[in-house]
Image: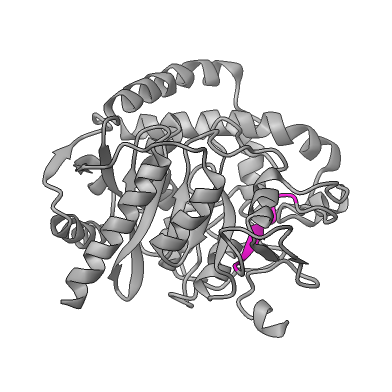
Amino acid sequence: MQAYHASSAFIPGPLLQVAATASGPLDELSFAVKDLIDVAGTVTGGGNPDWLRTHDPAPRSAPVVERLLAAGASVLGKTITDELAFSLEGVNAHYGTPLNAACPDRIPGGSSSGSASAVAAGLVDFALGTDTGGSVRVPASFCGLHGIRPTHDAIPLDGVLPFAPSYDTIGWFARDAAMLARVGDVLLPQAIPTPIETLVIVRDAFAIADEPVAAALREVCQRLGATQEIDVFGGAEADWFEAYRILQGAENWRELGPWISATKPTFGEAIAPRFAGTAEITVDDVARWQPLRDAIRTRLRAELSGGIAWLIPTAPCIALPKDMPGAGEQIGPFYGRALTLTSIAGHAGLPQISLPVATVDGCPVGLSIIGGAGQDRALLDAARRLAARLHNRTST
């Protein structure tokens, strides 16, 4: 039991274990569950002691958990999350910072930090997370994992603590593309995917990343034969970020504001101002930015169809160091760049897979593939092909 807690991936207390309920395609596999997702008989703690204290055990598991158990997999632990999912860092003031096994002196990324940590440390075969503004994608990049944010509404969010429902998704991590796809075969709607045949580099997304990260990922794109390039933001990167900040914040306060106002919970020093800021968002703010999001969604869903996928850096940088002097000054710019990148799939509700394809200064960096709405299975097929192609070229 002690070995499982060595990565600090799991919530405090006895390790939760739930046996598979049937035999199926995931027999003998183990998975961890982010502590935003219900498991029957346990309290979903949301990364905050006051949330844990004021809620009852879940009467049933979330459908996503039930489906995995019915496919033969077993739960092995609930994992630490950043408080009520409001972070991309993976630092929890109450429960600590899960280990980034790829770069132990650096943060794992959040808010699905514990799930990423458990997979990266080899403690489970795969793990569930949630992704609103990058909470699976960023930890996947920082920890050197495969991670998927599916098409919005592809997987039911019943039994999941909400953050911003029009952006919220359930995603998962694995150490290889084949395992990522095995889980997808169980969770995703049945479909006959249109194969991904054309990979297009999003030039202005690459411009957001640190130069060493962009250069390393461009070299991978070249190896994959991607030559076409487009611009997506149209010079309005700041507007894409602001639209996300306002719209997710308004939804977040609508969902969690009543509990925060009634309970007055203790949040970590970095988290408290974020919730306070969401309370100040007005109806006029939402009215200003919603049309932009609607236009983005319409345009991107039209452009990403018929076997086309876009390539972008998953995150703008490698994982930030723990306890680095001056880290506070870096967090704001990091969020601005990271959330701009993740807003492409977020605003449009598109599927995105992060692949661990390169390293910079000894730390992983992820390359993301974004596909058309409902093309999750095609993306998973493409991820397997691309991973095999890169492995073969590295081996020869």
Q: Is residue 135 left or right of residue 263?
A: left
Residue 222, quarter of the rendered image: bottom left
Q: Is residue 62 left or right of residue 147?
A: right
Nearest the viewer among 237 and 36 is 36
What span is in magenta?
29-38
Colouring rule applied to residues: one colour
Q: Is residue 234 magenta?
A: no
Looking at the image, is 66 positioned above or below residue 373? Answer: below
Measuring 43% from the left and 16% from the top, which residue is drawn there?
A: 291
Query: Residue 285: image x %, image y %?
Result: 53, 21
Query: Residue 337: image x %, image y %?
Result: 37, 46
Nearest the viewer among 52 and 300 is 300
Measuring 80% from the left and 71% from the top, which residue is drawn there?
A: 13
Nearest the viewer among 284 and 291 is 291
Query: Residue 128: image x %, image y %?
Result: 59, 55
Q: Where is the C terminus found, in terms of image quarters?
A: bottom left
